[in-house]
Image (cartoon, rainbow, N blue to C red):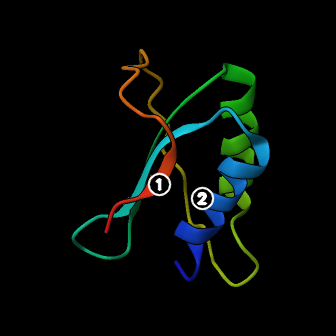
């Protein structure tokens, strides 16, 4: 997904209060996001991710809500 990781980082920063990570999985076609924050912020973030950046095609989004671990201080890309 072209520019998706940068888009997600920027969106998390713009919305504020979202911590976690984004990374490409080994096949390169799937991007994994782990995010924590207030539920309403996460729902906004999720809606933005479903749309994605201008030159990306988001084919699907799977969501697995869980208990926050508190391990993240920011939102960043794992390379």
Based on the displayed image, in which of its 4 quarters is residue 34 positioned?
A: top left
C-alpha gap between disc 1 and disc 2: 6 Å
Q: What secondary structure is found at the residue carrying circle 1? A: strand
Residue 76 is tagged as: 1
The answer to whether residue 63 is visible is yes
The answer to whether residue 32 is visible is no
- Above or below — where is 37 with respect to 67? below
Based on the displayed image, in which of its 4 quarters is residue 2 positioned?
A: bottom right
x then y, percent, for residue 65: 48, 24
Q: Nearer the viewer, residue 41 or 64?
A: 41
- Left or right of 54, for residue 7: left
- Left or right of 51, for residue 34: left
Name which residue lies at 73% across and 30% down: 41
Based on the displayed image, in which of its 4 quarters is residue 77 positioned?
A: bottom left
Which badge, 1 or 2, is on the more N-terminal residue? 2
Whether the residues at callouts 1 and 2 have beta carbons within 8 Å, the answer is: yes
x then y, percent, for residue 23: 37, 61
Give the residue at mark 2: 9
Name which residue lies at 37% across and 74% down: 29
x then y, percent, for residue 58: 60, 67
């Amino acid at each position: 997904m072209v520019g998706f990781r940068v888009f997600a980082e920027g969106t998390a920063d713009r919305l504020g209060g979202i911590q976690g990570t984004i990374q490409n999985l080994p096949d390169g076609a799937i991007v994994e996001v782990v995010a924590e924050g207030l539920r309403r912020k996460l729902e906004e973030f999720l809606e933005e991710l479903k749309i994605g950046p201008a030159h990306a095609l988001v084919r699907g989004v799977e969501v697995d809500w869980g208990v926050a671990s508190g391990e993240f201080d920011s939102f960043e890309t794992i390379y």
